[in-house]
Image (cartoon, rainbow, N blue to C red):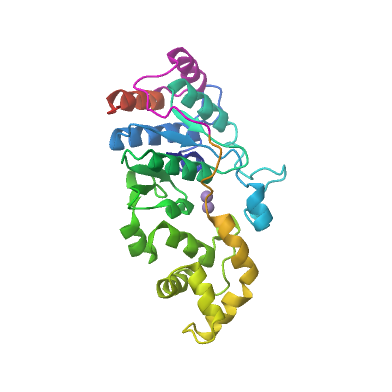
Amino acid sequence: MAGSASLYYRAFHGVPQSLTAPDGTPVNAVRGFLDALAFLVAEHRPARLVACWDDDWRPAFRVAALPSYKAHRVGADGGEDSPAALGPQVPVLVDVLAALGVARVGCPGFEADDVIAALAARAVARGDGAPVVVVTGDRDLFQLVDDAARVRVLYVGRGVRRAELVDEAWLAEHHGVRGGAGYADLAVLRGDPSDGLPGVAGIGEKTAAALLQRHGDLAGVRAAAADPASAVPAGQRRRLLEAAAYLDAAPAVVRTVAEVPVPAVADELPRAAADPQRLEELVRRWGLASSVERVLASLAGHRGR
Ligand code: MN
Ligand code: MN
């Protein structure tokens, strides 16, 4: 399953806007996304794949918990402040994925992150032992990493060709935390300015990881901060106690919600386009020939079931 917005944003910023349709409309994000899809299918040969959509990029339940959540990214129209040339490309991508027959799913009121969490839980519950790989450029999804359940993240923050496979050993090495749950606790303490998550003032990534190592998890850190007999240094203790309201609210913002009413999806990767005629129209209209050819070649060669 793939967090699509992180992939098309990445494509938009990584592929020149001089790539346009015959009428001059930029299609760089569409082409970059399709090229990434072709590469991932050829390289990883998944039997199933779902493009997960942000039907809501800033869900009300997260804003209610923490009004600063993504507040700096709200545009003049109340929607997400995204580049003008990107918006019109998203429906094109939707059409192309439908014509290809690549599954795409979102859920009103939830982010792609939550949809991914729900689908990962569903795949694990299926119990056939098939590994789950979450493809994303969003570090928030590291919280889903679970070796025992065979859930890993293919982090494409530096592009699909420089992807890193994130498992529990990777999280321990790069962030000093135990598993996906440890990463979520770290994200709460450290915060994330790009999401409007302040974190605990004065507690950066290293201090947060050290606190979690010493006290187990977020609840353990907070209990230690409240216990005068604990080893938490006075400065950190004061900062943690002062951030009590934030620490009460932030976990509900940071943690993905797996209990999302995601419809059942036919997620088997097709071997050929579901609607070749429609696909041909889209290719001509938007000038997507080479990218779509690459996707079709990767689909024809994939393992399937
Ligand atoms: Mn996210
Ligand atoms: Mn994020």
Camera sees residue 189: yes
Residue 209 image point, x, y percent: 43, 70
Residue 231 image point, x, y percent: 46, 84
Q: Residue furthest right?
A: 77
In this picture, is 31 found above or below 64? above
Q: Looking at the figure, which quarter contains the N terminus?
A: top left
In this picture, is 152 found above or below 41? below
Q: Decide which of 198, 285 is in the foreground and name it.
A: 198
Q: Decide which of 196, 148 is in the foreground and name it.
A: 148
Residue 60 image point, x, y percent: 67, 48
In this picture, is 272 found above or below 87? above
Camera sees residue 19: no
Q: Residue at x 38, y 43 (%)?
A: 124
Q: Is residue 28 magenta?
A: no
Q: Residue at x 68, y 54 (%)?
A: 64
Q: Residue at x 52, y 67 (%)?
A: 189
> How many numbered badges does the structure rendering display?
0
Question: For this view, does 101 lie left or right of residue 299?
Answer: right
In this picture, is 301 found above or below 154? above
Q: Residue furthest top?
A: 277
Q: Is residue 267 magenta?
A: yes
Q: Which residues are magenta?
A: 263-289
Q: Looking at the figure, which quarter contains the C terminus?
A: top left
Residue 25 image point, x, y percent: 56, 28
